[in-house]
Image (spheres, rainbow, N blue to C red):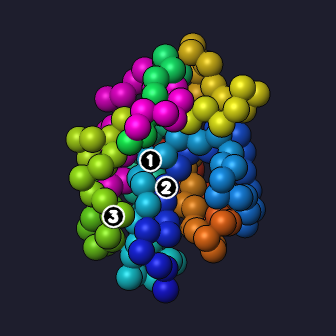
Amino acid sequence: MPKPGDLLLVHMLHPEPVGSYFDRGSWPLHMTLARWFTSDVPIQTLRQELLQASRRIAPLEITVGPEVLFGLEYTIPVNLIVEQAHVAQLHQMLLAVLVQLGVSMADPTVWTGKGYQAHVTVQSEDKRTMPGDKILVDNFHMVRLADKRTCEIIAAFPLGASNG
C-alpha cells in the first residue's frame, strides 16, 4: 500500500519510459500537475480512473515564462508557465479525479487548487527551460516514491480522445 505522500502526477518535458527510475534529488525536467498524495484504492483502479480522465483532456501547447524564485525561503529558481489558466484547468481536472477517489494530499492548502502555479524547476544551467520555449503537454505520468531516495515512473497517460 502506498505510504503517505508517495505518488504524484507530472508532465515530463522529455520522454521517460514507464518503469524507469531516477534519484529523488535529480529529477528529469518536469511540470508537476498534482503534488504528492497517497491513496487507499489499488494502483490499478487509480490508473484506470486517470486514463478515463486523460481521454477527456485535450493536449495543450504552453510557453515558458520568466524565471522567479519559489520555496519557503524563495531560493529555488523556476520558470513560470505563461498559460497559467490552461494548466490550472488541467490541474483542477486531475485533482477532481483524485479527490473523488479519496486520496490524501500531502498538504492540500499549499501549491494545490487555487494555490497552484505551473512552473518548471531549474535543475542546472544545462538542465532547464528558457523563457519563450514551447512545450506540448500531450501526456502526464504517475511517479511513485520507491524509497527515500528513488522515484519510479509507474504509469503514463496520453491526453485526448484518440488515446485508445
Horizontally, residue 19 falls left or right of residue 65, namely: right
Which residue is found at the position 52% from the left and 26% from the top?
Answer: 79
Q: Secondary structure at mark 3?
A: strand
Residue type beneath disc 3:
Met
Please identify the residue farthest to the bottom as the structure is shown: 1
Q: Nearer the viewer, mark 3 or mark 1?
A: 3
Q: Where does label 2 land, which residue?
A: 9
Viewer-closest of 139 and 152? 152
Q: Where does label 1 land, which residue?
A: 33
- The crowding category of the residue bearing disc 2, from other C-alpha atoms within 10 Å (few below 14, some 14 to 19, many at least 20), is many
Residue type beneath disc 1:
Leu
Compared with 137, 36 (above or below) is below
From the top left corner, tell me how far across and down residue 60 is, in percent: 48, 31
Q: Nearer the viewer, mark 2 or mark 3?
A: 3
Compared with 19, 163 (above or below) is above
Horizontally, residue 153 falls left or right of residue 40, namely: right
Q: Quadrant of the C terminus?
A: bottom right
From the top left corner, tell me how far across and down residue 28 is, in percent: 68, 45
- The crowding category of the residue bearing disc 1, from other C-alpha atoms within 10 Å (few below 14, some 14 to 19, many at least 20), is many
Give the magenta part as a residue range.
73-95
- The crowding category of the residue bearing disc 3, from other C-alpha atoms within 10 Å (few below 14, some 14 to 19, many at least 20), is many
Q: Secondary structure at mark 2?
A: strand
Residue type beneath disc 2:
Leu
Horizontally, residue 28 falls left or right of residue 145, namely: right
Give the image quarter of residue 104: bottom left
Residue 85 lies within the magenta run: yes
